[in-house]
Image: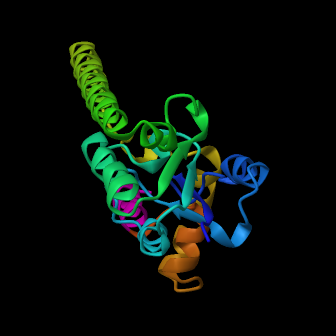
Amino acid sequence: MANVYGYIRVSTKEQNEQRQLNKMIDKGVEARRIFVDKASGKDFNRPQYKTLRRVLGEGDIVYIDALDRMGRNYDEVISEWKYITRELQADIIVLENETLFDSRKFREMGDMGRLMEDQFLSLLSYVADQERKKIRQRQAEGIAVAKSEGKHLGRPQLNLDTLSDKQRDALTTNYSRWKNKEITGVEFMMLLDLKKNSFYKIVKEYEAVGQ
């Protein structure tokens, strides 16, 4: 008997998968057959995707919210699409655009459908590659403009001047307590809301300017 599965991917642990989850449930997918990865889409080395791949069988259906939820490397997406639909004989339906992204429609057309699917996937790969090139070009242009304007790129440099008023107060109030071992370094870091490397950098600068 064929099974219906759902695959969900969000890029970080902070992102909420509930919107995608609701779509799967609306399609009647059982919660135990929904696989969720909180990982980058740069490749398919994701634990839940690997598990889904292992359990898929002939006639099964996989719902995905959008094609980029499957992955962002479109050459690999195409390879995975063909593996699932042709080798495993399962089907993929992309909810964002079911009219185009429903492998069952190509399957029903036989050899002609396979030819059309190949052309469609190749076009998809080309469009995605062009989009990646545009993004890289825009990023390069943005960096060049920022550099020409003398802007600092990357994280802001942490120093005494960039500390908040609260942090400066905590530093001046607790520095002598820390030196006299009334509080530990960890406690002092927590009071300053700084990580270890930043903490010692700030303390060194603080001591250099004579407190």
Residue 55 is at least partly visible in this image: yes
- Check the image and report above or below for 186 versus 164: below
Q: Residue at x 66, y 52 (%)?
A: 16
Please say whether residue 92 is one of the residues in the magenta stretch: no
| Residue 108 position (above or below residue 198) | above
In the rendered view of the protein, which quadrant contains the N terminus? bottom right
Expressed as whole percent of the image width and height from the top left, the position of residue 176 reads: 53, 72
> Which stretch is magenta?
197-211
Residue 4 position by quadrant:
bottom right
Front residue of this view, candidates 209 and 43 = 43
> Is residue 51 rendered to the left or right of residue 81?
right
> Residue 60: x percent and y percent?
54, 62
Residue sitting at x 50%, y 37%? 105
Of residues 46 and 195, the one drawn nearer to the viewer in this rendering: 46
Answer whether residue 208 is visible to the viewer in this image.
no
Main SS class of the magenta portion in the image: helix
| Up/down of 191 relative to 115, above or below | below
Which residue is drawn at the image coordinates 49% and 74% (left, top)? Answer: 55
- Toward the viewer: 156 or 102? 102
Residue 200 location (% of width, % of height): 37, 66
Taking depth in this image into account, of 62 and 22 the one nearest to the observer is 62
Image quarter hosting the C terminus? bottom left
The answer to whether residue 164 is left or right of residue 144 is right
Q: Locate residue 197, reporting x and y percent.
A: 36, 65
Q: Is residue 154 left or right of residue 109?
A: left
Examine the structure image and report whether residue 208 is included in the region drawn in magenta. Answer: yes
Which picture quadrant has residue 170? bottom right
